[in-house]
Image (cartoon, rainbow, N blue to C red):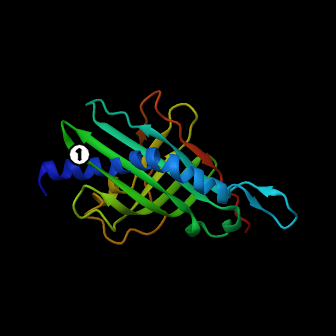
Amino acid sequence: MNRRTKSAALGLGAALLVTAGATGATGAAASTSASTSASTSASGEQQREAAALTGRAKLYRSAGDDITFSFDAHLAAKDNDDPLKATGTFEWSHYAGGDGAWAKAEVDCLLTGGKVAVVSGVVTDSDLPGAKGKRVGITVHDTGRQDRLGYSWASVGNPVETKDLPKCVGSAPFEKVKKGTGDFTVVPWNPKF
């Protein structure tokens, strides 16, 4: 794979996350939050959703790359025992020097603990050839000040080259978001074991 294609692939991974947060957070949040966060228990009390990852941010890169991630992922209270029933989307884009790509994925798993979330999904739309149908995973740490993020393709290769990535697999959140851009919010999961 040539350097330009590798840059585009890395950019796509980042771009898909950003776009998903921007687009998905608006439309999906309205429809998803109405159905997930307003679940009603048998006694008629409203329950919060079991887990969530929402928000949008740009990553910091000293070279000035434009990398954006966005999330609108939710696990309904009624599905508390099965993180594979999470719904929503996430997007990202990565552009540098006029080259890059974007992608959008449909959530297929969401696990959260404290202020850390791991979300995975299958790419449903992208301008990177060969990315559609590939699973990617992202980890977010909602620090409240300068959030952090990591993505599966940091260790297993770009999304196009990755084969059979399991659900809810990401990487340590090694990237820092650009100051003033991060608004990730993680709703912690409380499984009933």
Residue 140: give x, y in percent of width and height: 50, 47
Query: Hey, which residue is sitting farthest top in the picture?
Result: 180
Q: Residues within 10 Å of mark 1 (few under 14, many from 20)?
A: many
For the point 40% across and 51% down, the residue is: 91
For the point 43% across and 50% down, the residue is: 20
Picture mark count: 1
Query: Hey, which residue is sitting farthest left in the picture?
Result: 2
Task: Pick the quarter of the image with the C terminus.
Answer: bottom right
Residue 81: give x, y in percent of width and height: 67, 69
Residue 118: give x, y in percent of width and height: 51, 56
For the point 24% across and 53% down, the residue is: 9
Q: Does residue 160 appear left or right of residue 25 in this picture? A: left
Q: Amino acid at mark 1?
A: Gly
Q: Is residue 98 visible?
A: yes
Q: Does residue 93 appear left or right of residue 22 in this picture? A: left
What SS does tag 1 mark? Answer: strand
11 or 116, which lies in front? Answer: 11
Determine which residue is flagged by label 1. Answer: 100
Q: Does residue 97 appear left or right of residue 151 in this picture? A: left
Query: Hey, which residue is sitting farthest right in the picture?
Result: 43
138 or 66, which lies in front? Answer: 66
Say which quarter of the image contains residue 67.
top left
Q: Answer above or below: position of 193 versus 172.
A: below
Task: Pick the quarter of the image with the N terminus.
Answer: bottom left
For the point 30% across and 57% down, the residue is: 126
Q: Is residue 112 visible?
A: no
Residue 38: give x, y in percent of width and height: 72, 56
Q: Answer above or below: position of 164 versus 59.
A: below
